[in-house]
Amino acid sequence: VEGRELLYAFCQSHQVAHKQLGKLIVGQDEDVSALQTIASRAKDAGVENLRWLSQNELKTMEPEVRAGHALFSPSTGIVDVHELMLALEGEIEKAGGNVVTQSCFLAATPLGASACQGWQLDIKVGQQESHRLSCQLLINAAGLDADAVANRIEGLSADHVPQVHFAKGNYASLTGGHPFKHLVYPAPVPGGLGTHLTLNIAGEAQFGPDVEWLGPADPSRLPGSTHPGLNYAVNAARLADFATSVQRWWPSLKAERLQPGYSGIRPKLTQNAKEPAADFVLQGPGHHGLEGLINLFGIESPGITACLAIGNAVRQCAKSST
């Protein structure tokens, strides 16, 4: 909730393209319990405007959606992620920082006992020789490689580095037009949010993500290297499952209108769909005992929505450890 409000404000102040479309969460009779759980958790999290829709309201808002039950979240929106990243990069540079891409983290060594004097970092940029840098505060926000980075930090116990399991999320693109004005999410499925409808800033529709488990990450891998087995291509053979899933709530969808879209890899802290979803992990010195080190693990969806709130949490952790 905090992240959503911060993100809307940031997008408005930095002219980042975004739209507040609202989201429908739909299900059939067998999904009522899952929808009730969503409503209860939303209330506990401080969401005040999530509400149940009547059949007439649902038909008025999205005539082609077929569902016995629906929740409506009017505050949900979309953002141009590329524009958002450029705006955040601009803020970093305005504050005197640099963003260095195509770089590889090799190692971090504490300066002084328990890194109380900072950290010495070995970094390789592109094909150049490694560079040595130093810093007072090391924030490991390496996404897919956060565990691999952590395993190269001297003095950090392996007990504080969770095993990451990669899960691929595939998207299918819809060819031609569509009738939808809102995002549409089905009741969640194990391991993910279900094959939902999302719209981009241009109004184009895509469905996904599904959940394709790729197995455990190699904790000894080199951060920034190409991961064997991580293929971002969308397998066209999965489109039939997409169509079947979407047709539960949009029965008029013709399967041939779906085409392979894009995919992303998520660093999950659970190993399969049978385990309950794990929360984000933020570790400071109070967790692992090393001064000047903050680790972020398992940052997946809704990491973009929560990004600024996560930043605030990291800042608070840094302040409390100094």
Image (tube, rainbow, N blue to C red):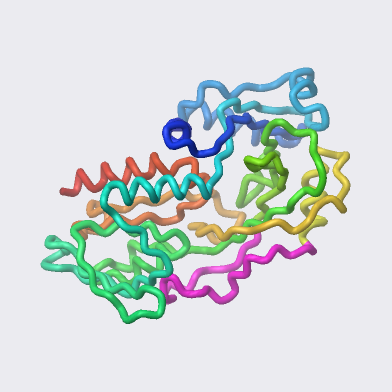
Instruction: Residue 56 in the image: state x and y as whole percent.
Output: 79, 18
For residue 84, above or below residue 54 = below
Instruction: Decide if residue 295 is on the left or right side of residue 183.
Output: left
Q: How many marks?
A: 0
Instruction: Residue 58 in the image: state x and y as whole percent.
Output: 75, 24
Instruction: Residue 81 in the image: state x and y as whole percent.
Output: 53, 47
For residue 302, above or below residue 18 = below
Residue 4 among magenta residues: no
Instruction: Residue 201 in the image: state x and y as whole percent.
Output: 63, 40
Image point (62%, 69%), residue name = 231
Q: Nearer the viewer, residue 131 or 24?
A: 131
Image point (43%, 49%), residue name = 280
- Main secondary-structure element of the magenta-colored stretch: loop
Instruction: Decide if residue 76 is on the left or right side of residue 199.
Output: left
Instruction: Name the image quarter holding residue 126.
Output: bottom left
For residue 140, above or below residue 29 = below
For residue 1, above or below residue 93 = above
Image point (35%, 71%), residue name = 105
Instruction: Decide if residue 289 is on the left or right side of residue 175.
Output: left
Instruction: Name the image quarter holding residue 97.
Output: bottom left
Residue 236 among magenta residues: yes
Residue stretch in magenta: 212-237
Image point (67%, 41%), residue name = 202
